[in-house]
Amino acid sequence: MKRLPQVTVAITGLSATDNPAPGVAVARCLRQAREFRGKLIGLTFDHRHTGLYASEIFDKVFVVPAPARGAESFCHALKEICRTNPIQILFPTLDPEVLLAAKAERTLNGLGIHCLLPDERQIRRRSKVELPALARRVGFSSPRTLVLSSGASLRTALQHFSYPFYLKGSFTDAQLVSNQIEAERAFARLSGQWGFPLLAQERVAGEELDLAILADQRHRLVGAVAMKKLGLTDRGKGWAGITVQAPEIIEKAEALVRTLRWVGPAEVEMIHDPQRGAVSLIEVNPRFPAWIALSAAAGQNLPLMAFRLALGLTVAPAKPYVVGCLFTRSVEDFFQPFERVAALAELEGLR
């Protein structure tokens, strides 16, 4: 197997709690690939993100500003890191960081850092506000959705939606609410944290399906792995799942990629209603899912393919993945000297 160039890859999104970010899984896919021989740098804005202590995966870790600080602060931190640890490839794995990297593409390229991302306009086209119209264009169903721009619109939603239903930030975050008190609290939290608009969305009954996809720079689908969730946490996050056959869904995903003129990774979240045979499009996230290591286990190492594309190498469409490959999450303890944790906490304060 031909070895790939020895470069340094930086990866964000190192939270590894019951609501894990994708960063550790993306890094694991690269580290375990025999043809990968580069270095892996972990980037985090919170020293409590436990993935940064996975020393068997990351060669080094650094603290960067939180996404809310903006693209300029993010790029300044990367510039300082590159003085001693030049980075060639960046994988932002959190939704806000993907948007930051897209906005800062020219600045990042000036630092010698390359990403595999769509432009800012394409990222916004898959936002939750735009999703119902996008779903109709590519052949998906979509749940009833109401855009909320004020407290008055929340009252309208409470009149027109049956409990439980979802309240969502327009870019990220969601909460299932079961009564008026929960709805008002969720509305206050989401609007305070993410601003307006918010969304009210009906809860669709059925099987939860996820599709991890990868598109090349010519907006072609080169890889796709479908997973059915088998176990959920109390927060509704997948804790176990199994790869399934999904040719019709993958065909719709190809149309989605072409319509959005997408580049890079994405996660397509759906609900399948077996009684009606309908598949509702719930979200399109602009990065790999946290369960992406399952793609490598099933024979399509999508992060490794994305790495090759980011290097400018040609990637042929992947071979079919293994159906019936199961993943489950577990808890792992990391042991660190307190001095290291304290040093990272101090750096976080300086950022």
Image (spheres, helix red, strand yellow):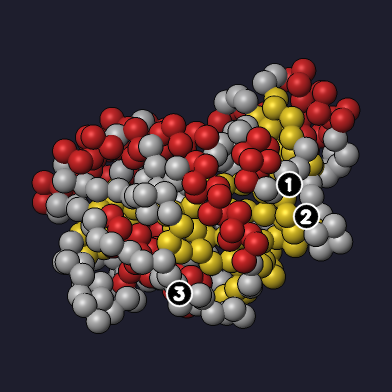
Label 2 vs 3, first from the N-terminus: 2
- Disc 3 to disc 1, C-alpha distance: 28 Å
Quarter of the picture holding the C terminus: top left
Going by the picture, which residue comes out furthest to the left?
83
Q: Quadrant of residue 335?
A: bottom left
Please say if 328 is above or below 341: below
Q: Position of residue 89 (x, y in %)?
A: 25, 53
Whether residue 13 is visible: no
- Disc 2 to disc 1, C-alpha distance: 7 Å
Q: Nearer the viewer, residue 123 or 77?
A: 123
- Disc 2 to disc 3, C-alpha distance: 27 Å
Seen at 83% across and 44% down, the residue is 164
Binning the other alpha carbons within 10 Å of mark 2 as few (below 14), some (14 to 19) or many (20 upward) gives some
Q: Position of residue 302 (x, y in %)?
A: 41, 65
Please say if 219 is above or below 225: above
| CB under 8 Å between discs 2 and 1 | yes
Please say if 110 is above or below 222: above
Q: Is residue 44 left or right of residue 148?
A: left
Residue receiving disc 1: 141
Going by the numbered disc 1, the residue's amino acid type is Ser
Binning the other alpha carbons within 10 Å of mark 3 as few (below 14), some (14 to 19) or many (20 upward) gives few
Residue receiving disc 3: 319
Residue receiving disc 2: 278
Quarter of the picture holding the N terminus: bottom left
Label 3 vs 1, first from the N-terminus: 1
Seen at 21% across and 65% down, the residue is 39
Mark 3 residue element: loop
Q: Position of residue 157 (x, y in %)?
A: 81, 28
